Image: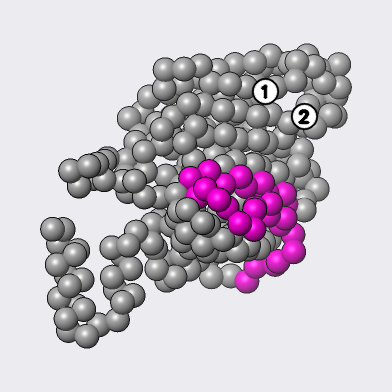
Amino acid sequence: MAEKPRLRVPSEAKTGDIIQIKTLISHVMETGFRKDDAGKPIPREIINSFVCTFNGHEVFRADLEPAISANPYFEFTVKMAESGTFAFAWVDDNGTVTTAEQGITVS
Amino acid sequence: MSSLTRRSALMLGAGMTLTLVAADDGMATPAEADAEIAKFTGGKATESGKISIDLPEIAENGNTVPLAIKVDSPMTAGDYVSEIRVIGDANPNPGIVRFHLTPMSGRAEAATRIRLGGTGTVTVMAKTSTGKLYADRKVVKVTVGGCGG
């Protein structure tokens, strides 16, 4: 997971607005069901968890299985009540965590 | 040769049905998909019509099928969708994804892209904080499956 994840988060909103967040991370999401040319199974290696928090509170979480397409993409909504920071974390089968953050001003 | 293949060959020789070979072709059995659904519902009855499932009728590429889910819910602190579970019966493992939402979500919506191994039924279920259970399903025709190598 070397590349930076891509985020689409509005930079501002009004109190009470429901905003839409889009996230994309590069990852092959190897299912574990494929075999290489020699017929040997290619081991599973996927991102298995994605979490979004706002000012430290969990807003949205996804438990991914191998049936999520490569380069996992998620869209979800958040109702805004205050300014602050969104924090995103992706965890893979090896326990490697990739994080990203984005602030938003709410007036 | 994998032991599964040998076992399947022996079973075929003994006159067993083809469904036992299904494990070799990479698809879950209907029973496995039902078991995964029952894990979420606890066997309880579900209400249909509350979940809108946006999936193509025909997916040209089973490797990346766009899925958008909307659940009818006020999403207030006292009544919100806490979990959404997606199951596919044409994949090696029926489980596809589980979403956890909170009252801060504002709307009970989620979208992603999924892999489908072949033509089959995608079941989307939801649980609310008040104990309600919703389920709806959609059939997707897949022209090129997305689980093989």
Residue A61: x, y in percent? 57, 37
Question: Is residue B57 covered in magenta?
Answer: yes
Place of residue A85 in the rendered image (x, y in percent of width and height, measured from the top left): 66, 16
* SS at badge 1: strand
> Dot 1 corresponds to which residue?
A8
Q: Nearer the viewer, residue B71 or B60?
A: B60
Rendering coords of residue A98 (x, y %) = 46, 21
Give left or right: position of B14 versus A61.
Answer: left
Which amino acid does the dot numbered 2 rest on? Answer: Ile
Instruction: Report the residue at 86% width, 16% height from top.
Output: A107
A94 vs B18: above or below: above
**Left or right side of A47 for A7:** right
Along the horizontal axis of the image, is B85 left or right of B147? Answer: right
Give the labeled residue for mark 2: A19
User: Which span of residues is magenta-colored?
Assistant: B45-71
For mark 2, give the secondary structure: strand
Question: Which residue: 68% across, 14% down?
Answer: A103
Of residue B111 and residue B100, the one placed in the foreground of this image is B111
Q: Amino acid at mark 1?
A: Arg
| Frontmost residue, B134 versus B51 | B51
The quarter of the image holding the N terminus of chain B is: bottom left
Q: Is B140 situated above or below B100?
A: below
Please report, as a chain letter, where disc 2 is located: A
